Image (cartoon, rainbow, N blue to C red):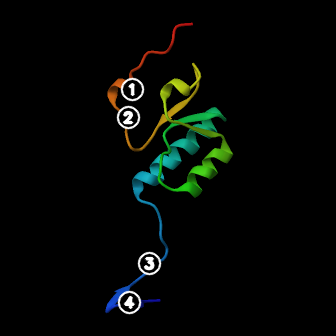
């Protein structure tokens, strides 16, 4: 329903949804959880939506700020925001 404020009209559109990039990012984490099982590590929160991030956490996604937090051999998904090439190409620690 339109709401008038100071001569302006605000229209709320329904249904509201996510852009294709957000949908794709969430789908990738969900597919990784299905394919590899929990835990799946994710570099940064993939979307700016607390509800979505919490749902993924409940399913087994672990969000980390630094790649060094990810155990050797674990599944890692990079965020939709991108990762600098130097961070993505860091060698794994020797064992």
The residue indicated by pointer 1 is 87
- Please name which of the two marks, 4 or 3, marks the residue nearer to the observer: 4
Query: What residue lies at 39% left-to-right and 43% top-to-bottom?
Result: 81
The residue indicated by pointer 2 is 83
Instruction: Report x, y in % for residue 40.
Output: 60, 34
Considering only order in the chain, which callout, 3 or 4, is on the residue closer to the N terminus? 4
Considering only order in the chain, which callout, 1 or 3, is on the residue closer to the N terminus? 3
Check disc 4 and report its element: helix, strand or loop.
strand
Considering only order in the chain, which callout, 4 or 2, is on the residue closer to the N terminus? 4
The quadrant of the image that shows the C terminus is: top right
The residue indicated by pointer 3 is 13
Check disc 1 and report its element: helix, strand or loop.
helix
Query: What residue lies at 43% left-to-right and 89% top-to-bottom?
Result: 2
- Please name which of the two marks, 2 or 3, marks the residue nearer to the observer: 2
Contact between labelled residues 1 and 3, with CB atoms less than 8 Å apart: no
Considering only order in the chain, which callout, 3 or 2, is on the residue closer to the N terminus? 3
Contact between labelled residues 1 and 2, with CB atoms less than 8 Å apart: yes
Instruction: Report x, y in % for residue 29.
Output: 54, 42
Check disc 2 and report its element: helix, strand or loop.
loop
Crowd class of label 1 (few under 14; some 14 to 19; many from 20; radius 10 Å)? few
How far apart are labels 2 and 3 at the CA level? 33 Å
Crowd class of label 2 (few under 14; some 14 to 19; many from 20; radius 10 Å)? few
């Amino acid at each position: 329903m339109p709401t008038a404020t100071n001569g302006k009209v605000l229209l709320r559109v329904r249904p509201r949804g996510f852009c294709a990039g957000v949908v794709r990012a969430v789908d990738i984490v969900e597919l990784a959880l299905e394919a590899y099982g929990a835990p799946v590590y994710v570099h940064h929160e993939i979307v700016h939506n607390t509800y979505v991030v919490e749902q993924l956490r409940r399913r087994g996604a672990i969000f980390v700020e630094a790649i060094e937090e990810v155990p050797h051999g674990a599944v890692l998904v990079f965020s939709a925001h991108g990762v600098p090439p130097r961070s993505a190409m860091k060698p794994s620690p020797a064992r």
